[in-house]
Amino acid sequence: MTNYTHWLIRARLKTRQLLLIVALAEEGNIHRASQVLSMTQPAASKLLKDLEDVLGVQLFERLPRGMRPTWYGETMIRHARAALNSLNQANDELQAAKHGQFGQVNLGAITAPGVVLLPPTIAAVKQAHPHLRITIQIESSNVLLEQLYRGTLDVMIGRLSEEHDTDDLRYESIADEPVCAVARPGHPLFGTTPLLFPDLLAYGWIVPPVGSVMRHKFDLMFQELDLQQLSNRIETSSLLFLTKMMQDSDMVSIMATDVARYYADHGLLRILPVDLPCELEPFGFITRRDKPLSPAAQVLLSALKTSAQAVYGKQFAPVAD
């Protein structure tokens, strides 16, 4: 413990003493100063005497028609004003944090809601609460769950699997996640009518890495269709590499439909008109039961649920305080 903390403990400074010496400096009279602070004059005189006794110096000269700060008093008044101003700022920050207008929120999401749900939500929240600090991570559900358990994420949007321990997690489903096949604009497959899934097997594929949920579903699709697993493939989790590689080649890929629509809207890829017997489990809002959400996190989660209601057409439970 620092020396100044020891001094503060010994001095037992009261906020009303700081208020009193500032009021005395402004009023110049203990009668008027006590009225400003809604206390009796004897109580004000005792507060001042107790402070002077602790400090061992006289803070004010007692004059026939009032009081005047001594050199020691001027010093104490200056620091009292600074301390009271700091306390006022602390109260303002606490009230702002209480209403979610200030603070830090760490949010994680898988790619599809990261593309569709997050941008309009974050824009709206930042407009309403410009001082709210938000960090965002776009990762797989497994990576995000590890961070949620470690406490480095407040809220995540992802999916839970059977291998996950869900006892300490709160989950609220948002929507299913359909997937589709994509290729570059102008790919020869767009001239094939009707287009069937076996037609896609004549080309190389870019697929998610082993261990990801989408790769697991992709491999299961081949088993259900009684097809041999692809040998002509590239494995990557990088969407930047995937889109560039597909623009420069005739390779095809599998992608969450919401993400594919985003790239299609920007002319980078096109969705192949073929049905895939493949769909990912629903994703949802996930938080920890044993870690109460901060007011800032409550504000963000509430905004996310409002946006999700508009995007996915589903009602969500209100965020608990």
Image: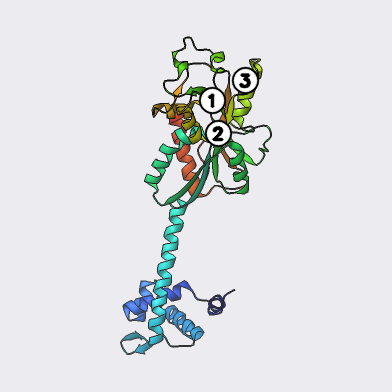
Which residue is painted at 42% across and 38% down in the image?
119
Q: Looking at the image, can residue 92 be seen? A: yes
Circle 3 or circle 2, nearest the eye: 3
Residue extending farthest bottom: 64
User: Could you tell which of marks 2 and 1 lies nearer the N-terminus?
Assistant: 1
Residue that badge 2 annotates: 284
Which element carries disc 3, helix, strand or loop? helix
Circle 2 or circle 1, nearest the eye: 1
Residue that badge 3 annotates: 221
Where is residue 117 shown, x and y percent of the image?
46, 34
Which element carries disc 2, helix, strand or loop? strand
User: Mark 2, residues whose alpha carbon is within 10 Å: few (<14), some, or many (≥20)?
Assistant: many
The colour scheme used to paint the residues is rainbow
User: Mark 3, residues whose alpha carbon is within 10 Å: few (<14), some, or many (≥20)?
Assistant: some
| In the rendered image, the vertical position of residue 227 relative to residue 207, given as above or below | above
Where is residue 133 shown, x and y percent of the image?
45, 50
Residue extending farthest left: 65
| In the rendered image, the vertical position of residue 198 relative to residue 24, given as above or below | above
Which residue is painted at 47% across and 23% down in the image?
183
